[in-house]
Amino acid sequence: MTFLITPIIFLFHIAEEWRRFPEWATRHSGATSRAWFVYSHIFLVASTIGICWTATVNPSRISTIWAVAVQWVFFTNAVFHLTTWRLFREYSPGVFTALIFFVPATLWQFATVQLDSAGFLLAIALGSVVGGLAVASLWLNMNIDWDLRRKRDHPYAD
Protein backbone atom coordinates (compact mmCIF):
# COMPACT_ATOMS: atom_id res chain seq x y z
CA MET A 1 0.00 0.00 0.00
CA THR A 2 2.93 2.31 0.63
CA PHE A 3 3.60 2.83 -3.06
CA LEU A 4 0.04 3.23 -4.39
CA ILE A 5 -0.19 6.77 -3.01
CA THR A 6 2.50 7.88 -5.48
CA PRO A 7 0.46 7.65 -8.71
CA ILE A 8 -2.58 9.16 -6.97
CA ILE A 9 -0.75 12.27 -5.83
CA PHE A 10 0.91 12.49 -9.25
CA LEU A 11 -2.55 12.87 -10.80
CA PHE A 12 -3.33 15.77 -8.43
CA HIS A 13 -0.04 17.36 -9.45
CA ILE A 14 -0.85 17.00 -13.15
CA ALA A 15 -4.24 18.61 -12.52
CA GLU A 16 -2.52 21.65 -11.00
CA GLU A 17 -0.04 21.91 -13.89
CA TRP A 18 -2.47 21.23 -16.74
CA ARG A 19 -3.72 24.75 -17.52
CA ARG A 20 -0.57 26.81 -16.97
CA PHE A 21 2.56 24.69 -17.15
CA PRO A 22 3.04 24.57 -20.96
CA GLU A 23 2.88 28.37 -21.19
CA TRP A 24 5.10 28.82 -18.13
CA ALA A 25 7.69 26.31 -19.39
CA THR A 26 7.77 27.97 -22.81
CA ARG A 27 8.48 31.35 -21.22
CA HIS A 28 11.30 30.01 -19.06
CA SER A 29 12.87 27.22 -21.13
CA GLY A 30 12.16 25.55 -24.48
CA ALA A 31 8.90 25.69 -26.43
CA THR A 32 6.29 23.16 -25.38
CA SER A 33 2.59 22.64 -26.00
CA ARG A 34 -0.43 21.37 -24.15
CA ALA A 35 -0.54 18.43 -26.58
CA TRP A 36 3.03 17.46 -25.66
CA PHE A 37 2.18 17.84 -21.97
CA VAL A 38 -0.69 15.35 -22.35
CA TYR A 39 1.21 12.87 -24.52
CA SER A 40 4.30 12.84 -22.32
CA HIS A 41 2.25 12.50 -19.16
CA ILE A 42 0.39 9.46 -20.49
CA PHE A 43 3.74 7.66 -20.54
CA LEU A 44 4.76 9.09 -17.15
CA VAL A 45 1.50 8.11 -15.43
CA ALA A 46 1.56 4.62 -16.95
CA SER A 47 5.18 4.11 -15.86
CA THR A 48 4.46 5.38 -12.35
CA ILE A 49 1.45 3.10 -11.98
CA GLY A 50 3.34 0.09 -13.34
CA ILE A 51 6.36 0.55 -11.09
CA CYS A 52 4.33 1.29 -7.96
CA TRP A 53 1.84 -1.51 -8.62
CA THR A 54 4.65 -4.02 -9.11
CA ALA A 55 6.36 -2.96 -5.87
CA THR A 56 3.04 -3.32 -4.03
CA VAL A 57 1.81 -6.68 -5.35
CA ASN A 58 5.22 -8.34 -5.92
CA PRO A 59 7.62 -6.64 -3.52
CA SER A 60 11.27 -7.38 -4.12
CA ARG A 61 14.42 -5.41 -3.49
CA ILE A 62 14.56 -4.26 -7.12
CA SER A 63 10.88 -3.26 -7.36
CA THR A 64 11.14 -1.42 -4.04
CA ILE A 65 14.24 0.46 -5.20
CA TRP A 66 12.44 1.53 -8.38
CA ALA A 67 9.31 2.61 -6.48
CA VAL A 68 11.39 4.65 -4.02
CA ALA A 69 13.28 6.14 -6.98
CA VAL A 70 9.98 7.24 -8.54
CA GLN A 71 8.96 8.92 -5.30
CA TRP A 72 12.38 10.61 -5.18
CA VAL A 73 11.81 11.91 -8.72
CA PHE A 74 8.71 13.64 -7.37
CA PHE A 75 10.66 15.01 -4.42
CA THR A 76 13.18 16.52 -6.86
CA ASN A 77 10.19 17.91 -8.78
CA ALA A 78 9.11 19.71 -5.60
CA VAL A 79 12.62 21.17 -5.27
CA PHE A 80 12.43 22.28 -8.92
CA HIS A 81 9.06 24.00 -8.43
CA LEU A 82 10.12 25.70 -5.21
CA THR A 83 13.40 26.86 -6.75
CA THR A 84 11.77 28.24 -9.90
CA TRP A 85 9.02 29.93 -7.87
CA ARG A 86 11.69 31.81 -5.95
CA LEU A 87 14.01 32.34 -8.93
CA PHE A 88 11.39 33.74 -11.30
CA ARG A 89 9.29 35.36 -8.53
CA GLU A 90 6.09 33.99 -10.01
CA TYR A 91 3.83 31.00 -9.49
CA SER A 92 5.44 27.83 -10.79
CA PRO A 93 2.49 25.67 -11.90
CA GLY A 94 2.66 22.53 -9.76
CA VAL A 95 4.39 24.07 -6.73
CA PHE A 96 1.48 23.67 -4.34
CA THR A 97 0.78 19.97 -4.95
CA ALA A 98 4.51 19.29 -5.05
CA LEU A 99 5.00 20.83 -1.60
CA ILE A 100 1.73 19.56 -0.08
CA PHE A 101 1.91 16.00 -1.44
CA PHE A 102 5.36 15.07 -2.79
CA VAL A 103 7.49 16.19 0.13
CA PRO A 104 5.39 14.58 2.92
CA ALA A 105 4.83 11.41 0.87
CA THR A 106 8.57 11.06 0.29
CA LEU A 107 9.36 11.54 3.97
CA TRP A 108 6.63 9.06 4.96
CA GLN A 109 7.82 6.52 2.40
CA PHE A 110 11.44 6.81 3.54
CA ALA A 111 10.33 6.27 7.14
CA THR A 112 8.19 3.20 6.40
CA VAL A 113 9.90 1.34 3.54
CA GLN A 114 12.11 -1.59 4.46
CA LEU A 115 15.24 -1.00 2.43
CA ASP A 116 18.91 -1.07 3.35
CA SER A 117 21.18 1.98 3.04
CA ALA A 118 22.65 0.82 -0.28
CA GLY A 119 19.13 0.39 -1.66
CA PHE A 120 18.11 3.88 -0.57
CA LEU A 121 21.28 5.36 -2.06
CA LEU A 122 20.67 3.58 -5.36
CA ALA A 123 17.03 4.76 -5.39
CA ILE A 124 18.12 8.34 -4.69
CA ALA A 125 20.75 8.15 -7.43
CA LEU A 126 18.26 6.74 -9.97
CA GLY A 127 15.59 9.24 -8.98
CA SER A 128 18.01 12.15 -9.15
CA VAL A 129 19.12 11.20 -12.66
CA VAL A 130 15.54 10.80 -13.89
CA GLY A 131 14.48 14.03 -12.17
CA GLY A 132 17.42 15.86 -13.72
CA LEU A 133 16.55 14.51 -17.15
CA ALA A 134 12.95 15.65 -16.69
CA VAL A 135 14.13 19.20 -15.96
CA ALA A 136 16.64 19.09 -18.83
CA SER A 137 13.86 17.97 -21.20
CA LEU A 138 12.17 21.33 -20.67
CA TRP A 139 14.76 22.86 -23.01
CA LEU A 140 13.77 20.59 -25.90
CA ASN A 141 11.57 22.12 -28.58
CA MET A 142 8.41 20.07 -28.04
CA ASN A 143 6.06 22.50 -29.70
CA ILE A 144 3.78 19.90 -31.32
CA ASP A 145 0.08 19.80 -32.10
CA TRP A 146 -2.43 17.07 -31.30
CA ASP A 147 -1.43 15.22 -34.52
CA LEU A 148 2.21 15.13 -33.31
CA ARG A 149 3.29 17.66 -35.94
CA ARG A 150 5.53 20.66 -35.30
CA LYS A 151 3.38 23.73 -34.61
CA ARG A 152 4.11 27.04 -36.32
CA ASP A 153 1.77 29.20 -34.27
CA HIS A 154 1.79 30.03 -30.59
CA PRO A 155 3.41 27.12 -28.73
CA TYR A 156 0.76 26.52 -26.08
CA ALA A 157 -2.38 27.34 -28.03
CA ASP A 158 -4.83 24.46 -28.37
Image (cartoon, grey):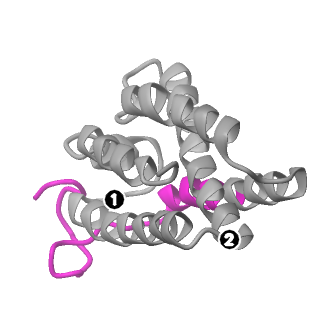
Question: Who is closer to the viewer here, 37 or 120?
Answer: 120
Query: Is 133 on the left-hand or right-hand side of 158?
Result: right
Residue in the picture at 79% in, 52% down: 120
**Residue under numbered circle 2:** 60
The disc labelled 1 sits on which kind of residue?
Thr
Q: Position of residue 53 (x, y in %)?
A: 45, 67
**Placement of 140 over or under 79, stated as above or below:** below
Residue in the picture at 52% in, 48% down: 2
Dot 1 lies on which element?
loop
Q: Position of residue 158 (x, y in %)?
A: 10, 58
Q: Residues within 10 Å of mark 1 (few under 14, many from 20)?
A: many
**Placement of 130 over or under 23, stated as above or below:** below
Question: Who is closer to the viewer here, 120 or 79?
Answer: 120
Dot 2 lies on which element?
loop
Q: CA distance from mark 2 to mark 1?
A: 38 Å
Magenta-colored segment: predominant secondary structure: loop
- How many numbered tags mark residues here? 2
Please tell me in which quadrant of the rendered image residue 47 appears.
Answer: bottom left
Q: Position of residue 126 (x, y in %)?
A: 72, 62
Write down the region rendered in magenta.
Answer: 129-158
**Residue under numbered circle 1:** 32
Taking the magenta stretch, the answer to whether it contains residue 152 is: yes
Q: Are the residues at dot 2 and dot 1 in contact (C-beta closer than 8 Å)? A: no
Q: Residues within 10 Å of mark 2 (few under 14, many from 20)?
A: few
Query: Is 126 on the left-hand or right-hand side of 43?
Result: right
Question: Who is closer to the viewer here, 89 or 92?
Answer: 92
